Structures are given as structure tokens and as C-alpha cells.
Image: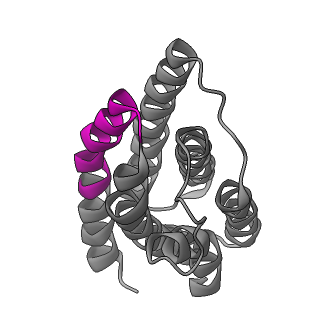
Amino acid sequence: MKMAATAVCGALALWATGVIAQPAGPTDAQIAAIVVTANQVDIDAGKLAVKKAHDKEVKAFGQQMITDHTGVNKQATQLVTRLKVKPEANDTSRSLKQGGDENLAKLKKLKGAAFDRAYVDHEVDYHQAVIDALDKTLVPNAKNEELKALLVKVRPAFVAHLEHAKSLQARIGK
């Protein structure tokens, strides 16, 4: 399952560290697409966790991911609509979508405690990669101050998600 987490986080991690980068960094339109896609990937995984998780706290965490990431996407969509910025698909957003689909396919094959562990392990890796991308790439390259402010505003929620996932991970075991 570690491979699915690596696949879904790979694009963010590579972009955040500069291994994959556009000469001038991502544009606001590309950042918008990355944000919406990253949130949707976690919403989709959360929906699966609500259906398949064995542990009630893992199930509740999945629901929290749906609620919180849907809220972030709503804010981002409202902002880019108001700013008349059309999210622009890019290599990172496409890679995130593909990695998310691969993760879902692997999770769908698992049941019970194996599903719970794989889902939570992925959430730990995924939220760390998103935080790294926010800090190293997305916030520094956002040109529009309102977009940058939204990214900064939602960062603490991603940190809280990471800490929650780590506590679940420690409780249910690796």
C-alpha cells in the first residue's frame, strides 16, 4: 500500500522539492487546479473510508476529510470564480488525479483492518506531501494575494489532519 501513497504524493513531492518545476513556477490558474484536484483526491478516499472502514474512528476521519476538503474546494471555487481565474490542468494536477485513482483501486481490494491501516497510512503521507507543496511551491508562487491568503488560511487544517492521521496510525498499528 505504501506504493499507492508514493504514487499519489509523488507529483506534489517532486514539485515541492523542485525536481519537477516550471521555469517560473506554477501560475495562479495552475495552483487553483492543483488545490482543487488535491482536495478531490482526499474527498474520494474519504468517501471510500466511510463505506469500508472497520474502525469507527477511521470511518469518522474519512467523513471529516469529506467535510473539510469539500469546504476548502468550495472556498477555492468561489475565489477563482470571483477573480475570473480558470483552473488550468497541468502535469501535477493530472498526476494527482491518476495517483488518487490508483490509490482508490488498491483500497477497494482491501477489507477490515488492512483497509484501515492502508487508508490511514496514505492519509499521513498525503497530508505531509500537501503541506510540503503548500510551503515550498504553492504559497511562494501564488501571485494573487487572495489566493495566497486562502492557501495560508487552510494550511492549519492540513496540519491538524496530518496529526489526527498520525494518532490513528499509532493506535491501529502499521
Which residue is more in the foreground, 93 or 98?
A: 93
Quarter in which the C terminus is drawn: bottom left
Task: Report which quarter residue 105 is drawn in.
Answer: bottom right
Q: Is residue 48 above or below residue 163?
A: above
- The residue positioned 34% from the left and 75% from the top of the image is 169
Query: Residue visible at 56% across and 46% down?
Result: 27
Q: Residue at x 34, y 39 (%)?
A: 148
The x and y percentages for residue 98 are 76, 63
Rendered location of residue 35, percent (x, y): 52, 45
- Out of 166 and 39, give the one closest to the viewer: 39
Q: Main secondary structure of the magenta part?
A: helix
Colour pattern of the rendering? one colour
Q: Horizontal placement of 145 versus 44: left or right?
A: left
Residue 6 is covered by the magenta coloring: no
Give the total number of marks visible in the rendering.
0
Q: Which residues are magenta?
A: 143-159
Residue 33, how many percent across, how many down? Answer: 62, 42
Which residue is rendered at x = 75% and y = 68% of the image? 102
Q: Nearer the viewer, residue 72 or 141?
A: 141
**Vertical placement of residue 174 versus 126, above or below:** below
Nearer the observer, 53 or 39: 39
Question: Left or right: 116 with respect to 100?
Answer: left
| Quarter occupied by the N terminus | bottom right
User: Outermost residue, top direction?
Assistant: 82
**Residue 20 location in percent, x, y?**
60, 75
Going by the image, does 106 lie left or right of 155? right
Task: Verify whether residue 154 appears in magenta.
Answer: yes
Extreme residue in the front direction: 23
Vertical placement of residue 85 versus 40, above or below: above
